[in-house]
Image (cartoon, grey):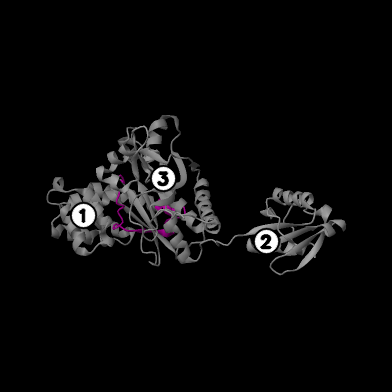
Amino acid sequence: MYDGLKGFREFYSGEQSARREVTDAIEDAAARYGFREVATPALERTAMYVDKSGEEIVDELYAFEDKGGRGVSLTPELTPTVARMVVAKGQELSKPIKWLSTRPFWRYEQVQQGRFREFYQTNVDVFGSAAPEADAEVLAVAADALTALGLTGDDFEFHVSHRDILGGLVRALADDPDAVDTGAAIRAVDKRAKVDDGEYFGLLSDAGLDRATAREFDDLITGVETVADLDTVAAAGGEDVEAAVENLRNVLAAAADFGAGRFCEVSLTTARGLDYYTGVVFECFDSTGEVSRSVFGGGRYDDLIESFGGQPTPAVGVAPGHATLKLLCQRAGVWPDEALSTDYYVLSVGDTREKAAEIARGLRELGHVVESDVSDRSFGGQLGYADSINAETVVVVGERDLANDEVTVKDMASGDETTAPVDEFPPASGRPTYEDYE
């Protein structure tokens, strides 16, 4: 007997049907905004991730040499892949490019709650628009997907920030702006809630801020709780920060017009740790705090396409991770029922296979989920199986029934049964049940 690999998951029928329902809700929300599905490869050249993130990234990848001697890796994220795809055919594609993809990814990392080595997420990206409406549309897609699952504003909230505000403040406050590593400072902000104060301020110090300046910086970003509070930040940061504040205001105003504003909160302690983010960023959190980590996040990455050799192409996206989204849905009590369900079981007794198969085909043509015997079970065995798959209705096709030109229709919840004329079952449309013939 072989054990499965740590961090790699199997989904049995009940859980998978619930996962499919959640995935469909996300994809349907994106499709209504005109996002088109793309499919992407499971393997990419390892050099693509090294060039983007440095040699140390290899320790976090499933990286190996293939039979052709090429260094390849299982894809740990989608953004570099779609960036490469845009570069390859960007001139042929109408802008903005709006893509949607649901697929697995792989990272060699510590397994913990909501984090696995093989994980699934749905990416929703817009390429070719720098307008605030593009950021707002991504927020609206995420909000629509969550509300379609039954979540409300009492269950989740988007913490919205702007990396240029953070970077601009660091430079404006520092005694020597050229000596400050703004990327390291932003990464420190991203870790703020995950480490103690001593480590956090130590990271800001390592980025080039003295202790007093680091405290001033932190007081400024933690003092922002509303859009109005951004005035103080703009005044402290100079022209670059003022421009970023104006952009953030515009995105939030557009998000309100698109119906997502009520889920958005300004939070300058939200930073997103990846360096390719350039402007507005956001993360989704459980409003109650019971899911202690970010559910998912997204943001703008305007420089990535150009860094891959393409023309300057603004971009923004979001990527709901399915494992953490499940935690939120379960906490809120809206995770889909994992119990199996079946509309009909067509039960054959005696030499009635031909007619039973005809009835089963007719029900399937009406769009129903229908099972019938493929294991040569007895009457009792078939009825027990029908119960195990939660069949709503059992249609008994027996030799005695057919001799009377009828079939027996049994409601499995109540146990009640009646008969229906065989020539009229199933009807041309609808979902015939016991109640239609009693």
Residue under pointer 3: 134
Dot 2 crowding, Cα within 10 Å, few <14, some 14–19, many 20+: many
Which disc, if any, is residue 386? 2
- The answer to which of marks 1 and 2 sits earlier in the sequence is 1
Tag 1 near tag 3, CB within 8 Å: no
Q: Which secondary structure lies at badge 2? A: helix
Nearest the viewer among 207 and 393 is 393
Does residue 81 appear to the left or right of 392 in the view shown?
left
- The answer to which of marks 2 and 3 sits earlier in the sequence is 3
Q: Which secondary structure lies at badge 3? A: helix
Which disc, if any, is residue 236? 1
Which disc, if any, is residue 420? none
- Amino acid type at image mark 1: Ala
Nearest the viewer among 259 and 388 is 388
Dot 3 crowding, Cα within 10 Å, few <14, some 14–19, many 20+: many
Q: Which residue is drawn at 68% across and 68% down?
A: 413
C-alpha gap between disc 1 and disc 2? 69 Å
Residue 326 % position (x, y): 46, 59
Q: Which residue is drawn at 46% across and 51% down?
A: 141
> Which one is closest to the eye, mark 1 or mark 2?
2
Residue 247 % position (x, y): 33, 48
Residue 223 shows in the view = no
Nearest the viewer among 270 and 130 is 270
C-alpha gap between disc 2 and disc 3? 49 Å
Does residue 307 appear to the left or right of 209 in the view shown?
right
Residue 61 % position (x, y): 33, 46
- Amino acid type at image mark 2: Ala
Based on the picture, tell me whether residue 6 belongs to the magenta stretch.
no
Tag 1 near tag 2, CB within 8 Å: no
- The answer to which of marks 1 and 3 sits earlier in the sequence is 3
The stretch of residues the image draws in magenta is 253-277
Looking at the rendered image, the quarter that the C terminus falls into is: bottom right
